[in-house]
Structures are given as structure tokens and as C-alpha cells.
Image: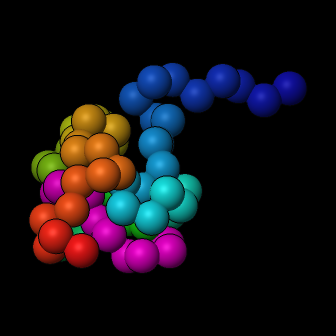
Amino acid sequence: MSEAKSDSTVLLSCPFCGYEPAGVDKIKNVWAVICLNCEYSGPPAKVKDAAILFWNTRKSRDFNPLGL
């Protein structure tokens, strides 16, 4: 029987392409969630749980900084 994931480990889909994120990776002393499809990375954080929180509370899919 599998265990249910807590809210702090559930990752929302990418806000830009809608793809499922790759997961949380530690790169050069910071954590970030990275999308496997478009390679968007969420805001960096000093701890893993914060990177997940930042990813899950980021701008919505219709956020378009380049105006495309």
C-alpha cells in the first residue's frame, strides 16, 4: 500500500507549459523545482520545502512576462 503525499511534497504542474515538474533538485546550495518539458525552474530556496512552496504558489499559467 502506498502512502499519501503530504501537501508539502505535492508539486503542481508547470505554470508555463502545463507539464508535470521533474522534481526538486539541489544545485549550488539552493533548491528549485524544474520542469522536464520547458526547463522552467521555480524560484530558488535554501531548503527543499520552501522550493516546493514557492513552486506551488507561483504565478498562474497565464503569466507571460515576454508578452508572447
The chief SS type of the magenta part is loop
**In the figure, is residue 4 to the left or right of 19?**
right
The quadrant of the rendering that contains the C terminus is bottom left
Query: Residue 27 falls in which quadrant of the image?
Result: bottom left
Q: Is residue 37 magenta?
A: yes
Image spot of residue 4 (x, y percent):
66, 24
Q: Nearer the viewer, residue 14 or 3?
A: 14
Query: Residue 26 falls in which quadrant of the image?
Result: bottom left
Q: For the image shown, how many numbered marks are present on the structure? A: 0
User: Is residue 6 something that shows in the picture?
Assistant: yes
Q: How is the image coloured?
A: rainbow
Q: Is residue 56 magenta?
A: no
Q: Nearer the viewer, residue 54 or 4?
A: 54
Image spot of residue 3 (x, y percent):
70, 25
The quadrant of the rendering that contains the N terminus is top right
User: Is residue 29 something that shows in the picture?
Assistant: no
Q: Residue at x 18, y 55 (%)?
A: 43
Q: Is residue 64 above or below residue 2?
A: below
**In the figure, is residue 19 to the left or right of 14?**
right
Image spot of residue 48 (x, y percent):
29, 45
**In the figure, is residue 20 to the left or right of 25?**
right
Q: Residue at x 45, y 64 (%)?
A: 17
In magenta, the rendered stretch is 36-44
Q: Nearer the viewer, residue 18 or 39?
A: 18
Of all residues shown, which one is farthest toward the right?
1
Q: Residue at x 51, y 23 (%)?
A: 6
Of all residues shown, which one is farthest toward the front?
68
Image spot of residue 19 (x, y percent):
53, 61
Query: Residue 33 falls in which quadrant of the image?
Result: bottom left
Q: Residue at x 16, y 57 (%)?
A: 44
